[in-house]
Amino acid sequence: MPGIDDDLFPAGIQPATATVVKEEPSDTAVASQELETRLQQDETRKQQLGPARQFAGVPMAPIRTIEVFNTNTLLYGRPGSGKTFLTATAQLSKHMAPMMYVSCEAGSSTIRQVSADIMILPDPTVAGSVTWEQFEAIYDELDRQCYNTKDGPEFRTVAVDTGTELQKINMEWVMKQTLAAHPDRDPDVPGLHDWGKSSNRMRTVIRRFRDLPMNFIFVCHEQEDRDNRGLLWKKPDLPGKLTNQAAAFFDQVMYLYTKQVSEGDETSASNIKRVLMTGALEGYVTKDRSGKLPLLMVDPSMDKIFSLITGS
């Protein structure tokens, strides 16, 4: 493939055409003046759009007047592929900072490597991972700030890491309710009703977070599953139909993996590249509704992804 390093693709994949973008280093800090300028620009754009027209009481507008201010992304991959690190780079973007990192796996060491300014919930010195009650309370407060305060939300980006573990936290919450009503039930064996309730609740909260007027990053682990043709698919690690349903909610579904790019010591960091797949490719649940991202991005950052999507 002219101009493309085929070795960057996952094993066994060599598409006929593709584009690879090499990420440039990001700034290591975000100036407060830049954030203030960005907020002023957002407000100016909204005022330029004027009062919304309505149809049957529902606001409407020509699609040409709709500007992309925020992104919503489902990011998945194997443990150790760099998902948390990539997510944390949102704090280094003048378009996406400040960010809130909701921890579902009690891990903060990786994001500390990116920026000491990231706000993590819950405080690791107080609790490990977030509870389901806390997670819903976080949404309620973000919703209040977005729609019922003069200054808008305190954060520009919210990240949930990982959705895979969040679903398990939700199931624990569901089972507590089930056991309260049926003490004789085995707490380790959810029934069909429990799975259905958990999936419905997860769908609801994912959709609600996605619809907030801010950037949303939902991180998941990876799972493999064969379709009825025997083709092995890599997809976000969520149970049952929730995998495809959750992926449908997002504008971008991206798969992050690592590749050894040259012969030599596999343990050498210079020999390993993180590659982000953003577009549709058979065997991978990926998509880019913006149509502005390359199929592969090498050593990506959230700032580069945001800039390509929005043209900022």
Image (cartoon, helix red, strand yellow):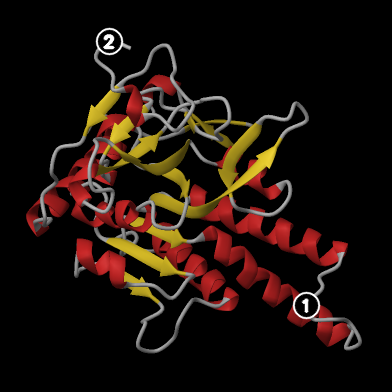
For the residue carrying disc 2, how many other residues have a C-alpha within 10 Å: few (<14), some (14-19), or many (20+)? Answer: few
Residue visible at 47% across and 28% down in the picture? 289
Q: Nearer the viewer, mark 1 or mark 2?
A: 2
Spot the residue most to the front. Answer: 264
Residue visible at 68% across and 49% down in the picture? 242
Q: Which mark is residue 110?
A: none
Residue visible at 55% across and 33% down in the picture? 284
Q: Secondary structure at mark 2?
A: loop
Left or right of 6 on screen, residue 10: right
Q: Position of residue 220 (x, y in %)?
A: 51, 54
Q: Which residue is mark 2?
A: 2
Left or right of 25 on screen, residue 110: right
Q: Position of residue 45 (x, y in %)?
A: 26, 36
- Which quadrant of the view contains residue 291? top left
**Which of marks 2 and 1 precedes in the sequence?**
2
Q: Quadrant of the C terminus?
A: top left
Q: 51 or 249, which is in the foreground?
A: 249
Q: 7 or 111, which is in the foreground?
A: 7
For the residue carrying disc 1, how many other residues have a C-alpha within 10 Å: few (<14), some (14-19), or many (20+)? Answer: few
Q: Amino acid at mark 2?
A: Pro
Q: Which residue is mark 1?
A: 188
Residue 65 in view of the camera: yes
Q: Position of residue 2 (x, y in %)?
A: 27, 10
Q: 117 or 78, which is in the foreground?
A: 78
Residue visible at 52% across and 54% down in the picture? 221
Relative height, residue 267 to residue 131 (above, below): above
Q: 150 or 91, which is in the foreground?
A: 91
